[in-house]
Image (spheres, grey):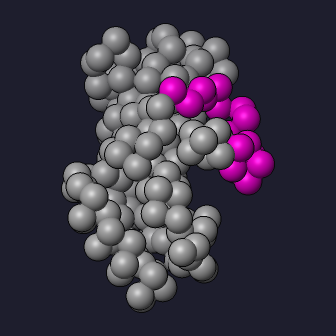
């Protein structure tokens, strides 16, 4: 149910999502993978528009953080990007994959520690890396630092 809930959240609360041609393939607390339709993201050179690539990278990263929160029954959607950098390595002229992972891989124990800090302090930060690839070849690399504010937690 996790993937469907996140896709619903994206569709209703992140209005740009509907226009990016993204289709959720896998979303878990360890990775978020989307397929992107180039035809909805074209620039004047018939390659992927840089702004669409950035928006897709942020969307995948946001989805990953949201999945982590859902996994641990944290009900907040108060997730904001605080800092980001992106490198465009090559033009993209076909459909592409957008894959977000945490910069620092987390096992169950480290996830619980991160969530405990969030609920105890009311706020926590996390870094996410998004890779955009075509046929397994990296075309874009994004790193974003997100801040999560806790509202409530279900027990």
Closer to the camera, 79 or 43?
Answer: 79
- Whether the magenta-drawn stretch holds residue 120 is answered as no
Q: Is residue 112 visible?
A: yes
Closer to the camera, 84 or 148?
Answer: 148
Expressed as whole percent of the image width and height from the top left, the position of residue 124 reads 40, 76
Kindly report the secondary structure that dominates the magenta region of the rendered protein: helix
Expressed as whole percent of the image width and height from the top left, the position of residue 98 reads 44, 31
> Which residue appears farthest toward the bottom when viewing the image?
121
- Whether the magenta-drawn stretch holds residue 24 is answered as yes
Expressed as whole percent of the image width and height from the top left, the position of residue 57 reads 47, 41
The image quarter containing residue 83 is bottom left
| Quadrant showing the N terminus | top right
Number of labelled discs? 0
Q: Is residue 61 visible?
A: no
41 relative to 145 in the view: left or right: right
| Residue depicted at 61% across the width and 46% down the height | 6
| Quadrant showing the C terminus | bottom right
Closer to the camera, 93 or 26?
Answer: 26
> Which residue appears farthest toward the front when viewing the image?
155
Closer to the camera, 19 or 108?
Answer: 108
40 relative to 26 in the view: left or right: right
Q: Provide the residue span drawn in magenta.
A: 8-25
| Residue depicted at 60% across the width and 26% down the height | 23
The image quarter containing residue 154 is bottom right
Expressed as whole percent of the image width and height from the top left, the position of residue 99 reads 39, 34
Vertical arrangement, residue 118 with respect to residue 86, above or below: below
């Amino acid at each position: 149910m996790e993937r469907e809930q996140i896709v619903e959240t994206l569709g209703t609360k992140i209005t740009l999502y509907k226009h990016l041609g993204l289709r959720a393939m896998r979303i878990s607390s360890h990775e978020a993978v989307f397929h992107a339709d180039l035809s909805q993201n074209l620039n004047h050179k018939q390659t992927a528009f840089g702004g669409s690539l950035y928006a897709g990278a942020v969307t995948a990263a946001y989805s990953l953080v949201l999945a982590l929160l859902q996994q641990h029954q944290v009900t907040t959607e108060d997730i904001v990007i605080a800092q980001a950098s992106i490198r465009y390595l090559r033009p993209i002229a076909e459909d592409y994959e957008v894959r977000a992972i945490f910069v620092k891989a987390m096992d169950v124990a480290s996830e619980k520690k991160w969530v405990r800090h969030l609920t105890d302090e009311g706020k926590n930060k996390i870094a996410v890396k998004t890779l955009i690839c075509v046929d397994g070849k990296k075309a874009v690399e994004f790193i974003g630092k997100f801040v999560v504010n806790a509202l409530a937690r279900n027990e």
